[in-house]
Image: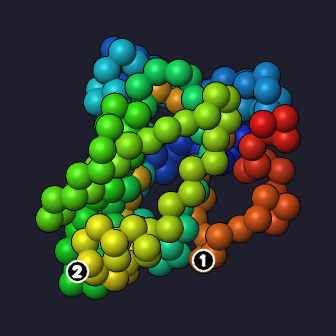
């Protein structure tokens, strides 16, 4: 879905930037280009895929993985899914959230990041089943808000071990 090392990586992502920035920059720790999303207010600066409203990713694989760097500031991301009743549901993971709250169409969850680079892996099949008591059908979209650096976002059919991943999507070995 996103690999920061590619030249055209942001072509399929919509950028909303107010009082912040979305820019490519080299991260010394991973020695490669990353995408920094940074702002004072997390809600005013984000990347969204797909880039056009009304379009969907339509990805059936249930494992969503994000490789992000903790900038030790507030951070959140949203994941939009479709369930077996064709209802659109949303998961929001946020460092601002203290407890999990489930409402009919949104589940907000606390997010705790380690210092430095993190691999965030969500089993959307299990999350949809537990939060909404329905079956996951497909991934519709992703919004990644400030404040983080992104190395990659990918979706797989199963949970992968780190040795199965290409080097450009792994977190640094020193972590």
Q: Is residue 139 left or right of residue 83?
A: right
Way the structure is coloured: rainbow
Above-or-below relation of 75 to 121: above
Number of the label disc, if any, that sits on residue 157:
1
Q: Which residue is drawn at the image coordinates 75% and 43% (left, top)?
A: 171
| Residue 83 visible to the viewer | yes
Q: In which quarter of the image is the N terminus?
A: bottom right
Query: What is the crowding at mark 2: few (fewer than 14 residues within 10 Å), some, or many (at least 20)?
Result: few
Q: Is mark 1 on a helix, strand or loop?
A: loop
Nearer to me, 149 or 12:
149
Dots 1, 2 in contact, CB < 8 A: no
Above-or-below relation of 50 to 10: below
Q: Name the spot of residue 21 as percent of width and height, x first.
A: 45, 20
Q: Is mark 2 on a helix, strand or loop?
A: loop
> What's the CA distance linking mark 1 and mark 2?
21 Å
Query: What is the crowding at mark 1: few (fewer than 14 residues within 10 Å), some, or many (at least 20)?
Result: few
Precedes in sequence: disc 1 or disc 2: 2
Q: Name the spot of residue 151 as percent of width and height, x first.
A: 66, 40
Q: Which residue is drawn at the image coordinates 83% and 50% (left, top)?
A: 167
Q: In this view, does 84 lie to the left or right of 159?
A: left
- Outermost residue on the front side: it is 99
- Residue 164, quarter of the rendered image: bottom right
Q: In this view, does 120 lie to the left or right of 145?
A: right
| Residue 15 visible to the viewer | no
Number of the label disc, if any, that sits on residue 21:
none
Q: Name the spot of residue 98 as percent of width and height, x first.
A: 32, 38
Q: Name the residue under label 2.
A: 86
């Amino acid at each position: 879905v996103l690999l920061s090392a590619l030249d055209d990586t942001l072509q399929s992502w919509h950028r909303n930037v107010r009082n912040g920035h979305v820019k490519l920059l080299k991260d010394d720790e991973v020695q490669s280009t990353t995408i920094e999303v940074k702002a004072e207010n997390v809600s005013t600066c984000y990347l969204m895929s797909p880039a056009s409203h009304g379009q969907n990713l339509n990805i059936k694989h249930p494992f969503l993985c994000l490789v992000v760097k903790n900038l030790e500031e507030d951070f959140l991301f949203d994941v939009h899914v479709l369930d077996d009743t064709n209802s659109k549901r949303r998961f929001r993971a946020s460092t601002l959230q203290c407890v999990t709250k489930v409402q009919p169409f949104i589940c907000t969850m606390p997010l705790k990041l380690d210092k430095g680079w993190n691999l965030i892996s969500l089993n959307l099949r299990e999350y949809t089943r537990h939060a909404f008591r329905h079956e996951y059908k497909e991934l519709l979209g992703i919004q990644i808000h400030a404040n983080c650096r992104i190395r990659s976002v990918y979706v797989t059919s199963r949970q992968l071990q780190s040795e199965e991943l290409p080097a450009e999507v792994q977190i640094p070995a020193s972590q």
